[in-house]
Image (cartoon, rainbow, N blue to C red):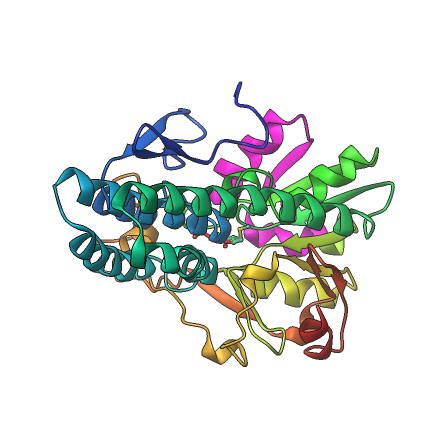
Amino acid sequence: MSTLPFPFPVVRWDAGDVVLIDQTLLPGRLEFRRCHTVAQLCVAIGELAVRGAPAIGVAAGYGLALSWIRGMEEGLGSEECEAQLGRDRRTLAATRPTAVNLVWALDRVLARTEPLRAEANCEQVLVALLCEADAVLDEDIAMCRALGRAGQELLPQQGTVLTHCNAGGLATGGYGTAVGVIYAAREAGKEIAVFADETRPQLQGARLTAWELLSQGVPVTVLCEGAAASALRQGLIDAVITGADRIAVNGDAANKIGTYPLAVLAARHAVPFYVAAPASTFDPRARTGGDIPIEMRDPQEVCSWRGVRSVPEGVDAWNPAFDVTPADLVTAFITEHGVLKPPFPTALLEG
Ligand code: MRU
């Protein structure tokens, strides 16, 4: 089992490279992937070697430093480095269209280093880019801890939480949003067990949530998504908590495909459905869920698993990576500012 420190070192800057836990290999192998170029980092994001909206944001922040340092090594002047930075920002932003934290982190790092980039030498700019990327990482961990503390108060002293996909340490700077609430509950002395939806087609729940909870000594049981209705109906679940990739102003929330049916099921069985996400996941430019772009992924992810075909040749698949849960199915949002209950959007705007 993992001997990793906790919060997990999901994304790090190391000797001029971005180093990631390679999540495509878990749970079988715990290995790190070294990205030397922005192109390699974009491939890693596209392949889900690093995934989860906040973790992608952290990685992209370091990606800007990667762009700059490679430019310096190629002997580019500050103007050429700046032009390359702009191109790399656009390439990074296009890798995962639904995760708003990606664009949020890129814009933040660029905005906060802009005055310096206009006047300082290349070395000073690199230091500034790295400092800002470090700040995005450190603040993400702090926000997730705060969010966890706020959210754990919603949970009973003893109970079971159903979660979907992986909104844990592996999906963030290291601590987690939905799963962070569970860590915080346990830190507060509560006995919380987890049911983890396996999460077709990439199995983030079965592979990643189960792996990280096991590594932290949290009791975890994996179930097929299709079994969630039965678990809820049998009264095995006290609360459903998921993360989000983007939340619109009216409270509609995009998250891994399969979240919306879970919210419908939770409402049907009068079980609270919570969405845990930091403020960086709230998109003021998305008025409703209809404004959230939904990433469409390769049908091959549905048609085969690790190269073995499971759907007849000649049959296509429809593979949206995310769905949108309407705000009226969300019992509350759990953020680092506290718990936001309806009516939305008033509560969101006040948050
Ligand atoms: O496709 P993924 O694995 O990046 O999807 C991740 C999710 O849907 C998470 O629930 C979401 O990003 C929140 S992570 C704290």
Number of numbered tags placed on the structure image = 0
Q: Is residue 348 visible?
A: yes
Decide if residue 29 is on the left or right side of residue 268: left
Q: Does residue 230 belong to the magenta stretch?
A: yes
Q: Furthest residue to the front?
A: 119
Q: Main secondary structure of the magenta part?
A: helix
From this viewpoint, which residue is outermost toward the right?
Answer: 157
Residue toward you, 21 or 109: 109
Q: x, y (%) of residue 263?
A: 65, 64
Look at the picture and state if 321 lies above or below 286: above
In percent of the image, x 64 and y 44: which residue is there?
Answer: 142
Residue 115: x and y in percent read: 38, 60
Residue under the image location 77 percent in, 35 percent down:
186
Residue that extends furthest to the left in the rendered view of this protein: 75
Horizontal and vertical percent position of residue 218: 68, 30
Q: Position of residue 255 (x, y in %)?
A: 52, 60
- Do we see residue 43 in this rendering? no
Quadrant housing the C terminus: bottom right
- Between 63 and 74, the one lying in front of the other is 74
Front residue of 104/132: it is 132
- Looking at the rendering, the stretch of residues picked out in magenta corresponds to 204-231
Q: Is residue 235 magenta?
A: no
Q: Quadrant of residue 111?
A: bottom left
Question: Residue 249 appears in which quarter of the rendering?
Answer: bottom right
Residue occupying image coordinates x 65% and y 68%? 264
Which residue is rendered at x = 62% and y = 60% of the image?
Answer: 262
Q: Is residue 44 found left or right of 236 in the rendered image?
A: left
